Amino acid sequence: MKEIPEEIKKEIEKLVKELNYHNYRYYVLDSPVISDEEYDMMLRRLKELEEQWGYILPDSPTQRVGASPSEKFEKVEHREPMLSLDNAFSIEELREFDARIKRLLGTNESIEYTVEPKYDGLAVELSYKNGVFFKAGTRGDGYVGEDITQNIKTIKAIPLRIEGVDKVPDEIDIRGEVYMNIDEFERINKERQERGEPVFANPRNAASGSVRQLDPSITARRKLHMACYGIGYYSGIEIKSQFDFIEWLRKARFPIPAYIKIARGVDEVINAIKELERIRQTYPFETDGAVVKVNDFELQKRLGTKTREPRWAIAYKYPAHQGITRLINILSSVGRTGVITPVAILEPVRIGGVTVSKSTLHNWDEIKRKNIKIGDYVIVERAGEVIPHIIGVVIDRRTGNETEPEAPAHCPICGAKIVREPGEVALKCINLNCPAQVEERIKHFASRRAMNIEGLGDKTVSLLHERGLIKNFVDIYKLKQDHLRDLPGFAELSSKKLIEAIERSKRTTLARFIYALGISQVGEYAAKLLAEHFRTIEDLYHVKMEQLIKIPQIGEKTARAIEQFFNNEENLEAIDELKRMGLTVENPDYQEKEKPLPIKGLTFVITGTLPRPRHEVQEIIEQAGGRVSSSVSRNTDYLVVGEDPGSKLTKAQELGVKTVSFEELLKLIRQD
């Protein structure tokens, strides 16, 4: 690269800074201070200089679109789990949430909460190092998401460099929701309809589909927005509360929630939720509720998390959109576990901007309880503005021509007799060779989050099963290229690619493999828990409930299902057969029980410059069983002090917290 004159470097740096500021004014504040023509002239000048001298800053606005389309999304791990929220659907449930918080904290004092809108979009994490954006990922399963860095760069409201604050963190992961305004959603759907393409069901799906484009230029053509409201891993900065964090985000030029209010006690929370419900009708985007969080970060840490949700937050869902339509028929759907679910076929009705023509009826007891008949006019609701279900019947519109629905006595797919297990409401087909179950189990086994067999989609599974080539998931690994050549849609190349994908899938992780097995009650989260507590798949053979319920997050029902599966000799033989065919299962999630944890349960805070990078010191502490907090409190056991310590040292001295150097920390861990 040729020598760059200093004045050119300064001009490029000045242009980048000014253009990023004007992006912030335009896309976040909605308050531009220069004309579009002026902005375009500055951007054109920047492009010319970058092309001429090859000097391109990482936060240059020219880098927002420019990456080549990728073949697939890489995986990205979250340093702190991205958990989902528990829901409340009534004021009573909110009061129960508040009472639970007080009970867990051992106080009768009013708790300080924040109230924010619940955005209906795609949860995303943005990662910054030394103030510069370098990575973005979807939530995925909460532990591992998809790398969408290039696509996120196209959202101009997201800063590529943190500015505007006194202290830039060493590292920080910022969470939020990518969403699409309703008018943009309608514009895109109109264009897709004109091109004969399938339309998006709602703005949330449109936003998710836009972010997950393999070609970033397609994402760039769609007007996406983001609201930042959460924090994951961070170091080199102190933040004490949710409200302080939102204020920090605002100063750092991030797009923040359209509404946030501090509420002292549950009554103020309820008032804020009612206020937000009135205001949300004016927003250009969809919201489906309000998020209530304990404001104080130290209290959040004390409250901790349960299985998949933090104990310190809850999402209050506003009453769902409703519509009235006629129930034409009730059909039966057979799932992969044999459960037969009644499905209502409805006269199409528009509810909350979406056309609904089907609705789950959950089970036959539910149909009786709600006194639903075929031909009835029913009230249909989109719970959480997503899932349609029937909440009641309009009795006054009955004509007498309605008919009582009858629960099936035989499986609608294979004809086998249906059973109802003691204590269960579900009807089940227990024929393991039932085509519906076999196909669904194979589809699940091959799916992206399970064994991830690329090319073995729903249609291909149905075709292979119909031709008798696969009768269970073990048969997948018996397929040869010769079996595929004569099938419709399979040429030499496509059959070769599928066999290669099947071969690649033989190397997997224990968590993925357990999930792929399709055990009743076991989703991705439970599969990961099992992988953390059992080193190999063989360790689960003949497992007993007593062993399983020792894992705090696994309940009795789930434990029973796991015990039944791994004590079934046919299931174990199927797993062994897969291993004989070359299946290799690794387990990076296993947590060594024998490993000594000399500082288990102790809380550390770090201040000053240490001989090792701060993230490494944190890792050393955590691997030895300790916990690292961002601020000093009475709950802090040790302050690790480096050169040029900050105000944390003064506070530690005031509170009588012990201080140690980095060398003393290592001795403490080694128990010298």
Image (cartoon, rainbow, N blue to C red):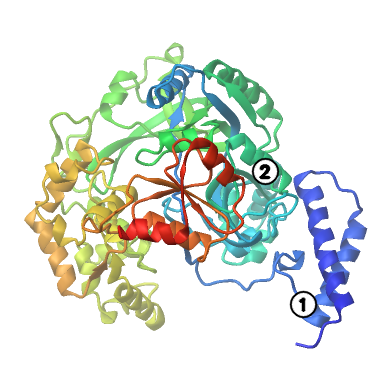
Q: Position of residue 176 (x, y in %)?
A: 58, 46
The N terminus appears in which quarter of the rendering? bottom right
Q: Mark 1, mark 2: which one is toward the viewer?
A: 2
What residue appears at the point 28 percent right and 57 percent down from the top-left corner? 591
Quadrant where the image shows the C terminus: bottom left
Residue 321 is situated, as x and y percent measured from the top left of the image, at 54, 28
Q: Secondary structure at mark 2?
A: helix
Looking at the image, residue 314 lies above or below residue 51: above
The correct choice, above or below, for 386 with respect to 218 in the image is above
Does 667 sit above or below residue 53?
Answer: above
Residue 521: image quadrant is top left
Q: Which residue is mark 2?
A: 248
Residue 55: mark: 1
Q: 633 or 118, which lies in front?
A: 633
Name the outermost residue toward the left: 569
Q: Mark 1 is on which residue type? A: Tyr
Taking the spot 61% from the left edge, 67% from the top edge, the residue there is 215
At a point 81% along the width and 86% down the height, the residue shown is 3
Which amino acid type corresponds to the residue marked 2 in the rendered image? Trp
- Circle 2: is it few (<14), some (14-19), or many (20+) Cα within 10 Å? some
Q: Is residue 55 visible?
A: yes
Question: In this image, 332 relative to 357: left or right?
Answer: left
The label shown at residue 174 is none
Q: Is residue 651 left or right of residue 445?
A: right
- Give the mark nearest the N terminus, 1 or 2: 1
Q: CA distance from mark 1 to mark 2?
A: 31 Å
